[in-house]
Image (cartoon, rainbow, N blue to C red):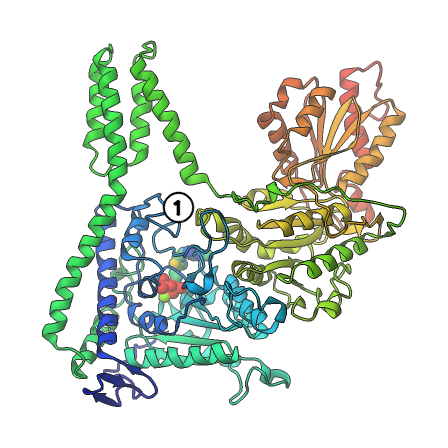
Amino acid sequence: MKKVKRQNHNSKTTILKTDKKKQQIRFASIKLTPEEIIKDYRLAFQSRQVSLIGRKEVMAGKAKFGIFGDGKEIPQLALAKAFRQGDFRSGYYRDQTLIFSLGMHTMQEYFAQLYAHADVEADPASAGRAMNAHFGTRSLNPDGSWKNLMEMYNCSADVSPTGSQMPRLVGLGYASRLYRELKELQHLKQFSNNGNEIAFGTIGNATCAEGMLWESINAIGVLKAPVLLSIWDDDYGISVHNEHQMTKANMSELLKGFQRKKGASASSTTGSARNGFDLYTVKGWDYPSLAETYLTAAEVVRREHVPAIVHVVEINQPQGHSTSGSHERYKSKERLQWEEEFDGIRKMREWMIASGVATTEELNRFEEEDVKLVVSIRDQAWQAYQSPIRAERLEVAKMIDEIAQSSASQAELQRLKNSLLAIPNPLRRDIMVTIREALMTSPDENTSGKQNLVAWKQKHDAFNVERYGSHLYNEAADSALQIAEIKPLYSEKSPTVNGFEVLNACFDAALANDPRVIAFGEDVGKLGDVNQGFKGLQEKYGELRVSDTGIRECTIIGQAIGTAMRGLRPIAEVQYLDYILYALQILSDDLATVQWRTRGGQKAPVIVRTRGHRLEGIWHAGSPMAGLIHLLRGMHLLVPRNMTQAAGFYNTLLRAEDPALVVEVLNGYRLKERVPDNIGEFTVPLGLPEILRAGKDVTIVTYGACCRIVMEAAELMRKTNIDAEIIDVQSLLPFDLHGVIGKSLKKTNRIIFVDEDVPGGTTAYMMQEVLENQNGYRWLDSAPRTLPGKAHRPVYGSDGDYWSKPNVETIFEAVYEMMHEASPGKYPLFFK
Ligand SMILES: Cc1ncc(C[n+]2csc(CCOP(=O)(O)OP(=O)(O)O)c2C)c(N)n1
Ligand SMILES: [Mg+2]
């Protein structure tokens, strides 16, 4: 294992002069007053107390889990100095000192989240939904409208999977470039001042082993996005040393290839000189060098839009990784001793005394005060968290008491009440469990007291369902579900064109109507996408409105999330549905949860566009819809059968502020469709299936490319006297909000679900929606059926396809069999 480099002096960029008269400590290029330094020190010290006390809260059973920012305090004080209103942070759980320093959250809010205080006033980041140290400021007003982000220090909402802050960082930074370079965005003053905003990223050293870090750095460099990324390098990722994380065990070494050439500015026009990062390596305990590094680095990033990486080394983790374990198990004695000696707070203290900023006595006094301060903040947070729960407990105890007076189970009820009252740190679930047990005693006694308790239970159950479940989807007036339907209008003049040209006209109108709309993806720019939906639009709207990206699905989505969080309306393309798997983690963990994990505090109205279904080949014809419908709850998932329906969905989504994935039908781009006269205006409502063919014998439910095949199969059915009703679901999330399919089943009494997904996948989902949620089981005269694709991937070549996915004949046979089972005489079996 690499020896820890020992060094006892601050670097040479420290104090040049202490000018008592001017009351300024001057470094190589920056000036700080003693007051500011003392304020910083006290904040670092308080933050450390938050970590120490927070850990004890977990150990005492008052919170479930704790992860803290101890050891990372000093660099964050320095970073905070460079952070301006309008800037954004995308970081991880170690950043509490930065957060406190900028007032993004208070220490009381930090403790509230530790306790899982489920109230947005107490924990504005997640309203008790996220683990502790998951930060996020509220970009939205309570009505869902944007705040003025230029009056705030902004923090995009954290997620736990390591590295997931990186893709979003790409977009948060890139937005500044768009705001600076696109004149048509200049009026959006609440999001940007000429693109002067920096996106600050933070990441742990070990997380630098994740692919997302490298994909994101590369994208940031290519996009010349004003990002300043800090790597907090404490040599470990939990127990695993850098030697096992990265080649050469040193990020500064590895990053050298990303460094821009000396003297090259972002505006240089030649080749590789245009690209690159400024790189800095600085010690995490060296306050003056850190302050200078951050102020210098940020200045360049802001002015020149050249990204920078600050690799902060020699930092410690005094309490170990989290409350789940202790670091004495895997760190050597020598290392532990170094961590004590080089603790940032200790070193800053020594430096302040040595440079005359403060005396030992002064610092002792401050520290004494600050320990008390943090203890009292903790107590206030605990009180605020517990008091409503204790009040509810008391209410319920009284109700149980009252029931007990006239109950045969008096003793049992008293016992239940007393055990509830004896719980030292009661939870709402304790109260509910007690209520349920109390209601089970003497079930035949139906007193008014019991009725009151049932009413209380129902009311509070509803509160809690809302408390934990609200905002999975946009609940504001700009929800996609609120967008009124505008039918497509056709006239004699409406041209018949290739499907892709319908989309092309739709996107043209979208880009013309709203300067916030930007589109990007692989081959989207110059080529206008591989199927020409954006053909000619880069020429018309410029390289920043319609742009090419590298082959990097995950950060294409990150680029979209970040730009959407800063008020833009990205249409992000993933070239084929099969490759959405590369972006699925970030779609699922980040995009789909943005509104829910912040309880409506943030949004990212991203439109993801892709194409799929019905082609040949293991990785070019998949329709992994089941994976998507289950992992993307929180997004809309739309599967238009043709390009007109797709255009209508895009128009709906562009009028709303919700994230959505639209899967276009890959083999539909060359099929002929008519362009509606109101191509830029008409909308297709979400959650409304369309009946493509009315019939009375059987309901066939399908979507996407299967619609055409089922319609063809219906012709065969007609020839054998089967009158099928065919329904295009169109919108898998949300699913049939008005029970159209249930009503059809009520009429036909038979139902079959057809798609190209795996068995038990989306067909099973649709069946559950109709039979259970719409109570469709009541109307069944035949066993309900599903006809999905095979469990294996679809084979390349037409024969392989024929035995991989439902086709006209297998659909016909499945339906015919259902009819045969019901009326064997009328429908004799002729193919088996
Ligand atoms: C994708 C993913 N893998 C694993 C984990 C579990 N985990 C949480 S933190 C962590 C170590 C991170 O180390 P580092 O990036 O150095 O940050 P540090 O905690 O040391 O500041 C691991 C493995 C996770 N949260 N997400
Ligand atoms: Mg680490």
77 or 768, which is in the foreground?
77
The answer to which image quadrant residue 97 occupies is: bottom left
Quadrant containing the C terminus is: top right
Q: Residue furthest front?
A: 187
The residue that label 1 is drawn on is 129
Identify the residue at horizontal 29%, vertical 80% (top origin). Answer: 288
797 or 495, which is in the foreground?
495
Q: x%, y% of residue 28? A: 32, 88
Q: x%, y% of residue 31? A: 30, 83
Residue 616 showing in the rendered view: no
Element type where label 1 sits in the image: loop
Identify the residue at horizontal 20%, vertical 57% (top origin). Answer: 374
Q: x%, y% of residue 575? A: 69, 58
Count of number-bearing discs = 1
Quadrant containing the N terminus is: bottom left
Type of amino acid at the residue the image marks with label 1 = Arg
Identify the residue at horizontal 81%, vertical 49% (top origin). Answer: 677
Q: x%, y% of residue 403? A: 25, 16
- Looking at the image, residue 164 sits to the left or right of residue 740; the answer is left
